[in-house]
Amino acid sequence: MKIILKQDVKTIGKKDEIHEVSDGYARNFLFPRGLAAPADAGALNQARTKSEAKAHHEAEARAAAQELAAKIQGQTVTTKIKGGASGKLYGKVTGKEVAELLTQLTGTEIDKKKVELPSAIKEFGSYDATVRLYAGVAATFKVKVEEL
């Protein structure tokens, strides 16, 4: 029997996917729990429409991420922070601060979790960093730390 999943089912697949399962499994387990619906002509058409819309939105999101990555690629963001005479900082530069600098640079909100620093930046200097904007879309840039 062909079914369309309404929710993720660990042993079968993900939501909105079409699968072939045994009649008994569908009638006795999936349908009563609301995990699946029979795949009739109308439901199949609706599932295809949803998958096409999802693919379109993912393509738009990927294109926007690639455009943003092109803006960031090779740029240098500079932050000024207090530090000691030995070149050590009073504190450290975090992903949150770098994300705020990138937001100012691009005008687009960047999540701090997407910024990857080589390690905790605790000294003055220039560091390479990466921002992962989308699956498979990343941009490298430099973080320059100067004394205030």
Image: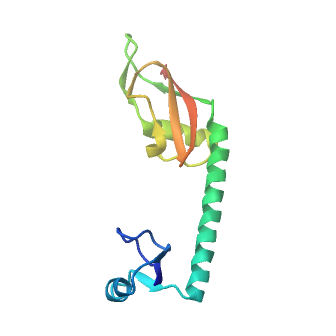
> 32 and 12: which one is in front?
12
Horizontal and vertical percent for residue 91? 35, 27
Residue at figure coordinates x 61%, y 49% from the top left: 65
Give the colouring mode of the picture: rainbow
Q: Is residue 145 left or right of residue 65?
A: left
The number of numbered badges drawn on the structure is 0
- Rendering quarter of residue 56: bottom right
User: Residue reaching furthest top?
Assistant: 86
Residue at figure coordinates x 50%, y 40% from the top left: 99
> 147 and 34: which one is in front?
34
Horizontal and vertical percent for residue 78? 55, 27
Horizontal and vertical percent for residue 106? 63, 42
Q: Is residue 30 left or right of residue 70?
A: left
> 84 and 128: which one is in front?
128
Q: Is residue 22 left or right of residue 68?
A: left
Q: From the viewer's perspective, is residue 107 above or below residue 30?
A: above
Residue at figure coordinates x 67%, y 39% from the top left: 70
Q: Is residue 78 left or right of residue 88?
A: right
User: Residue reaching furthest front?
Assistant: 22
- Rendering quarter of residue 94: top left
Horizontal and vertical percent for residue 3? 47, 81
